[in-house]
Image (cartoon, rainbow, N blue to C red):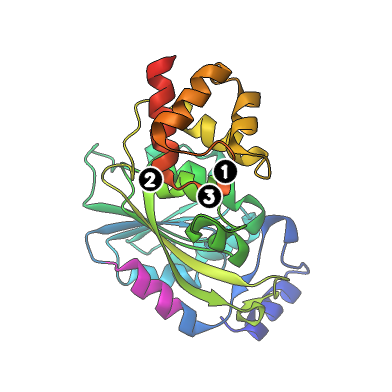
Amino acid sequence: MNQQQIRDFFALNHTRPKKQLGQNFLVNPEVLKIILEAGELSDADTVIEIGAGLGCLTDVVARHAKRVIAIEVDELLYNVLASQFSTHSRVQLLNVDVLKLELNSLLSDGAGTVPTTFKIIANLPYSITTPILWKLLAHHKQIHSCVLMMQKEVAERIVAGPGGKDYGALTIGITYRAEAELIATLSPENFYPAPKVDSALLKLTMREKPKVAVKDEELFFKIVRTAFRTRRKMLKNALVRGRFASDEVLMTAFKELGIAPQRRAETLDITEFAAFANFLSHSL
């Protein structure tokens, strides 16, 4: 659909796109081609589309995938999808909030056997991008890859390297489970209504094994979150406040690992955080 068609649709239904649901509809057909290419779809793939909207992407994906499970929380838009795809053998529609959805119910077929691959494609509501990301990462063993439209600022945080202001706990959390690739950046005029920020298309390919080996994942992530919670503080001071171990044990860890306690969290890469967590897991 182009911008005028979307305008006409909402005028006909005496309503407007819902800002609280992050409804910014893609109006540049060239971007659909980029999404499709990034998804590398085959007839062995089952695609879960989050936020199907008016079905433009759903229609394109259904031509290339084995099956599409299109999720749309807005009842008005869901009814449009139902009228368009109700007899389409490859499309299954769900009128549900993805954050309340038990994904395990979708990540296998009715017989309990897993199809070749599950892939996610989504134009994410920007206000809930992060919780959706964590939800998807929790199913890293079942999901092959994700092609996600999101706020450019969030995408830059995910692909950031150590040492910059964008690098943080989100970077490390996603890097641990997936390889991230920034596919494209998009200006607001690619959408209707135009968002106030630039957007980015990001691809996450789930790793067969985590990026680093850690003995205690809960401790590892707790250390990362604590370190970045006060990212301007020296690492030693931030971790002392986290009460992971005595001052003596912490200083021993710094010395043994060759990590200066005066460094800040944003200067450590994921391997250094893993080494620190592994050292402390032996000491606790």
Q: Which residues are magenta?
A: 32-41
Residue 215 percent coordinates (x, y): 34, 26
Report if residue 35 lies within the magenta region: yes
Tell which circle, 2 or 1, labels the residue nearer the N-terminal end.
2
- The answer to whether the residue labelled 1 contacts the one labelled 3, judged by CB atoms less than 8 Å apart, is yes
Instruction: Residue lying at the far right in this picture: please name it.
Output: 14
- Disc number for residue 11: none
Q: Amino acid at mark 1?
A: Arg
Few, some or many residues within 10 Å of mark 2 (<14, 14–19, 20+) = many
Which quadrant of the figure contains the C terminus? top left
For discs 3 and 2, the disc positioned in front in the rendered view: 3
Does 172 appear above or below 48? above
Q: Amino acid at mark 2?
A: Arg
Label 2: which residue? 177
Residue 242 percent coordinates (x, y): 61, 25
Viewer-proximal residue among 50 and 80: 50
- Disc number for residue 263: 1
Prevailing secondary structure class for the magenta stretch in the rendered image = helix
